[in-house]
Image: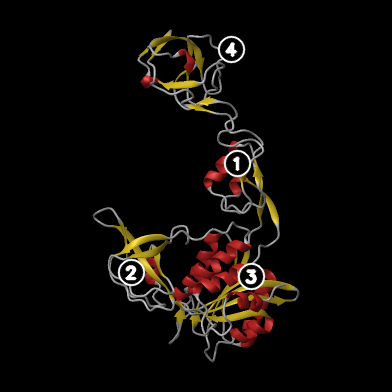
Amino acid sequence: MTKLDDIAGRIAATNQDMLEAGQAQEIIRAYASPVDGVETLGLTAALGRVLATDIISPIDVPAHDNSAMDGYAFNNSDIGTATVALKVAGTAFAGHPFTGAIAPGECVRIMTGAVMPSGCDTVIPHELVDARMDESATISPGVVKAGENRRLQGEDLAAGTAALRKGKILRPADLGLLASLGIGEIPVVRRLRVAFFSTGDEIRSIGETLDEGCIYDSNRYTVFGMLARLGCEVIDMGVVRDDPASLEAALRSACESADAIVTSGGVSAGDADYMTAMMEKLGDVRFWKLAIRPGRPMAFGKIASNGKRAYLFGLPGNPVAAMVSFYFFAREALLRMMGAQSEPLPILRVASQSSIRKKAGRTEYQRGILSHGPDGRAQVRVTGSQGSGILRSMSEANCMIVLSHGQGNVNAGDDVDVVLFEGLC
């Protein structure tokens, strides 16, 4: 297996004090790989899951030429340069086609979705007909073009072509598409199992006594939410104290039961941060100082225990820094492990409502509120104080303002990159 240092060495200079955000993302992207395992599910159970194979359409969609409108089907060659009254030969309903073929000078009253009658190539909507009677429809030349309002067989999807590609995360529209093909069961990648825990002697779980100097554990709940929104099978391992034996036992247990491990806290250089030694003891893990704000310290790699292996993401302990590190570094790797198609996060360019201080030489992720100004144009403002421990700033925000590595101060009115929380969270 390729070593993490080998990949890192190809991407980033080894003498750098800090990795740039893009370099760290590239290393993680190159090192992570999809899990094995496929299961077959019914459509209603497959929402949000990842397709394990291409789905090939067994039929044409639509299955026959049909009308896109309620109106009259006719042969366009019957319309010359003068208004003509076509005889109504019958009616075609969806599910009840007109049988037989029309003669020259005839038309068929037709409903949306009905099979196009033999001899007809065009449909005119009711409202464009000059005169409608039970026996005839009067049509003027040039009102509709030849072939208009006619949906062709296989126009949406031809039999034998891929309806959905391997790696697609199934959305409601995809379930409907599969149902339209008569497909009721599909192969999906098994759920990714992710174990997570918080570290620190000062951390208390909800319901425990909050002793002096202690804080309630918020990271476990944000990490749970982020993992659950990705569709992972989550394993909550609680809070692990700052001592080597407890950390090693927790990491081994997580490694033996999960595909990936997410921890928060214990990845900086403090005296009580034993996580560094434990991770290095158990596997191929590297600790980075990232040129980002918030969230400079982070660990990534792979650990092993009793023949089992698991990817590890060591997030910083500050609540906002933990979320930023997850969203912009761990999230893509977990999606890749799930077998999902890799798609970059959509970025909007939006005018900043105010100036933003920014130091060049690091990527900054500031919490923002996207809105629309009086002129209807999108605009964004920061939520206020951007401290890495102010979790309220994440709760109030609906987007992240991403200020690139080389970017300096932002003036009011300047465009900035924005990543919406919707679709990310």
The Cα–Cα distance between marks 1 and 3, rounded to whole angstroms, is 33 Å
- Which of the two residues, 199 or 187, is positioned nearer the viewer here? 187
Q: Which residue is mark 1?
A: 178
Density class for disc 4 (Cα within 10 Å; few <14, some 14-19, many ≥20) is few
Dot 1 and dot 4 residues touching (CB under 8 Å)? no
Q: Which residue is mark 2?
A: 382
Could you tell which of marks 2 and 3 lies nearer the N-terminus?
Answer: 3
Amino acid type at circle 2 is: Val
Q: Is residue 292 left or right of residue 376?
A: right
Residue in the image at 61% along x and 74% along y: 312
Amino acid type at circle 1 is: Leu
Q: Which residue is mark 4?
A: 100
- Above-or-below relation of 327 to 212: above
Q: Nearer the viewer, mark 2 or mark 3?
A: 3
Dot 3 and dot 4 residues touching (CB under 8 Å)? no
- Which of the two residues, 83 or 138, is positioned nearer the viewer here? 83
Q: Which residue is mark 3?
A: 31
* Image quarter of residue 87: top left
Could you tell which of marks 1 and 3 lies nearer the N-terminus?
Answer: 3
In the rendered image, residue 26, in percent from the top left (x then y), is placed at 57, 70
Which residue is farthest left?
374
- Which of the two residues, 371 or 231, is positioned nearer the viewer here? 371
Could you tell which of marks 4 and 2 lies nearer the N-terminus?
Answer: 4
Dot 1 and dot 2 residues touching (CB under 8 Å)? no
Q: Secondary structure at mark 1?
A: helix
